């Protein structure tokens, strides 16, 4: 699968009869089989970028080049589970009956750490387990690209770290590309193979981060963190 290329993307919204620009000529290449993290302050256009790539709304101008065999899944900040369905039924809900393979479903639930919770309802799950259910639902669709809009932002610190580790483990077991949006520098440094800074509607900086696992307290990572903070200011 070829990478994804975004060229001169522009998007504005009308608010109280005023035109508010969000993306102002954004260029971005998203490599295949890697985690690309988009980091930026609240309101900088991160979610808008994901929505354009997902085809949920069109850009005002510019081009989005996707591979012909692209299958995209979207993981939102909220799990968006159906409260009357079990974990198993929520995971399988988007699929047609003919597409459901019980052995594959069991493997996916085990991969995200939900084995044994197939019959649990959403209100019986912790926040982290609900988000794992949403991730399993996305993975069972066999996406080539997973768009993740601050999916761990509402979790407590320890659950958030657990979910980051789970995502890295899942990344090793699948060939999907991941575009992950966050406003947490530590999360970006933990997850990203590539980290881009979105500011004023364009990409203002790009960093390659080699190696996993990472020690965020190492001298190299502290220096990189300082560079990123400077890019955001």
Image (spheres, rainbow, N blue to C red):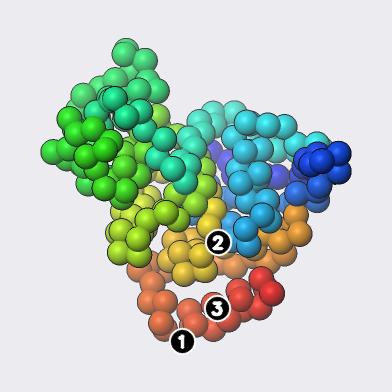
On the image, the x and y values in percent for residue 25 come to 80, 50
Using a 10 Å C-alpha cutoff, classify the residue at mark 3 as few (fewer than 14 neighbours), some (14 to 19) or many (20 or more).
some
Residue 157, image quadrant: bottom left
| Badge 3 vs badge 2, beta-carbon distance below 8 Å | no
Q: Nearer the viewer, residue 46 or 17?
A: 17
Identify the residue shown where x is 49% and y is 37%: 74
Q: Is residue 5 above or below residue 194?
A: above
Q: Which residue is mark 1?
A: 219
Residue 118 percent coordinates (x, y): 19, 32
Report whether 219 appears left or right of 134.
right
| Residue depicted at 42% across the width and 54% down the height | 154
In the image, farthest residue toward the left: 116
Q: Residues within 10 Å of mark 2 (few under 14, many from 20)?
A: some
x, y percent for residue 96 = 36, 15
Instruction: Say if 82 sits above or below 7 in the image.
Output: above
Circle 1 Cα neighbour tier, 10 Å, few/some/many (<14 / 14–19 / ≥20): few
Q: Are marks 1 and 2 in contact (CB under 8 Å)?
A: no
User: Upstream in the sequence, badge 3 or badge 2?
Assistant: 2
Indicate left or right for 92 with 5 as reference: left
């Amino acid at each position: 699968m070829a990478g994804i290329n975004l060229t001169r993307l522009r998007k504005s919204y009308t608010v109280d009869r005023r035109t508010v620009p969000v993306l102002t000529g954004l260029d971005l290449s998203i490599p295949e089989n890697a985690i690309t993290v988009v980091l930026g302050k609240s309101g900088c256009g991160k979610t808008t970028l994901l929505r354009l790539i997902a085809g949920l709304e069109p850009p005002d101008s510019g081009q989005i080049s996707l591979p012909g065999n692209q299958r995209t899944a979207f993981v939102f900040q909220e799990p968006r589970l159906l409260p009357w369905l079990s974990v198993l039924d929520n995971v399988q809900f988007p699929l047609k009956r003919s597409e459901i393979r019980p052995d594959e479903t069991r493997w996916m639930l085990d991969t995200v750490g939900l084995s044994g919770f197939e019959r649990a309802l959403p209100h019986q799950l912790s926040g982290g387990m609900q988000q794992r259910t949403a991730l399993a639902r996305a993975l069972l669709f066999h996406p080539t690209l997973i768009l993740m809009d601050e999916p761990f932002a509402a979790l407590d610190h320890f659950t958030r770290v657990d979910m980051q580790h789970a995502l890295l483990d899942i990344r090793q077991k699948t060939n999907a590309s991941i575009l992950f949006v966050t406003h947490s520098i530590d999360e970006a440094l933990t997850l990203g193979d590539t980290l881009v800074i979105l500011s004023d509607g364009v990409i203002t900086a790009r960093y390659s981060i080699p190696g996993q696992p990472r020690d965020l307290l190492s001298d190299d990572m502290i220096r990189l963190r300082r560079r990123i903070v400077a890019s955001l200011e």
